[in-house]
Amino acid sequence: MPYVTETNLTDVVLARWQDIPDPRLRQVMGSLIKHLHAFVRDVEPTGEEWFRAIDFLTRTGKMCDDKRQEFILLSDVLGVSMLVDAINHRFASAATPTTVEGPFHIPDSPHFEHGGNMADGAPGIPCFCVGKVTDLDGRPIAGATLDMWQTDGEGIYEAQKGVDEPWMRGVFKSQPDGSYIARTVAPIGYTIPMDGTVGALMDHTDISHMRPAHIHFCLEAPGFRRCVTHLFQRGDQYIDTDVVYGVKERLIADFVEHPPGTAPNGETVDTPFYVVHYDFVMQPEAAAGRVAAE
Ligand SMILES: [Fe+2]
């Protein structure tokens, strides 16, 4: 083995790690070492800065428990979560794009009838999500599940509200013609948690720590890829600066204001309400060739 110099150190380390038996681990560690060394050579940290970096990572880890995941938040604000999502969901261009799941999904939400209200008693402007679920050729998908979750009209998720009953979440099913209707309230934008290491980092910048108003969806249907996505409210003040980079143009929807009257589910609403029309297009399980062709 050659003795190390600043110049040959990266190659010496790479050589030692290149013989590990697991090929994927070998690939991952080789790339990590290469890029980490390049980063250090680029930044040239002082010893004090290196200790501060270690301390930042240590404190980030200590903030994590079963309810709080500061490392995922760090991944989010650096755009890594969205990059991983994009790499793993290379759908056909016609399919509804995915975006990050985020930390607020709770499984086993209550099931609602077509047009049911998942925001009963919640503060906020009534909002009806309507549309169809189809395949890439526009054929309706019957019986697709639409698992929805969001903030109430005050920006609070169930996990933050500390309630025993389900809050602002529900599962709807598409009808034989592919249609769905869900009653909720309009969400509002919210800040990521700013009381941890990521918040402290953001406070050293003038980068917005806000997310624009959105409704989370997870669509599932037999034979199709799971689609975890959001619908964003067009015109939201944070739509161009989402702190987790989750906004894709195709996921921006019009929240159309309606005066009091008959809502899409047939009920009478005595206050103004929103209607959000959005058609979801699902990616078939076995459409890899099609993705490559588009
Ligand atoms: Fe969210």
Image: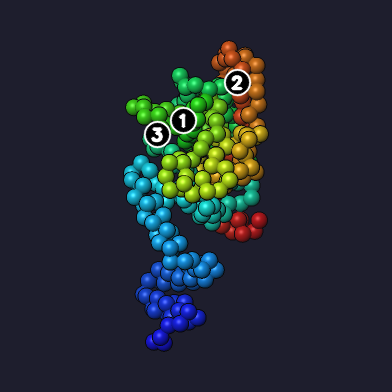
- Under circle 2, the secondary element is strand
Q: Is mark 1 within 8 Å of ligand 1?
A: no
Measure the C-alpha gap from mark 3 to mark 2: 26 Å
> On the image, numbered disc 3 is attached to which residue?
159
Q: Nearer the viewer, residue 30 or 197?
A: 197
Residues at discs 1 and 3 in contact (Cβ within 8 Å): no
> On the image, numbered disc 1 is attached to which residue?
156
- Under circle 1, the secondary element is loop
Amino acid identity at mark 1 = Ile
Residue 273 is labelled as 2
- The image quadrant where one finds the C terminus is bottom right
| Picture coordinates of residue 103, whole percent (x, y) | 43, 42
- How many residues crowd around disc 3 within 10 Å: few (fewer than 14), some, or many (20 or more)? some
| Picture coordinates of residue 285, whole percent (x, y) | 51, 51
As drawn, 245 above or below 41: above
As drawn, 271 above or below 212: above
Mark 1 or mark 2: whose residue is earlier in sequence: 1
Amino acid identity at mark 3 = Ala
Point 61% across, 26% down: residue: 275
Q: Is residue 39 left or right of residue 23?
A: right
Q: Is residue 147 left or right of residue 133?
A: left
| Picture coordinates of residue 202, whole percent (x, y) | 51, 47
- Under circle 3, the secondary element is helix
- How many residues crowd around disc 2 within 10 Å: few (fewer than 14), some, or many (20 or more)? many
As drawn, 210 above or below 152: below
Point 42% across, 51% down: residue: 71
Q: Nearer the viewer, residue 156 or 216?
A: 156
Query: In front of the other: label 3 or label 2?
Result: 3
Amino acid identity at mark 2 = Phe
Mark 3 or mark 2: whose residue is earlier in sequence: 3
Measure the C-alpha gap from mark 1 to mark 2: 20 Å
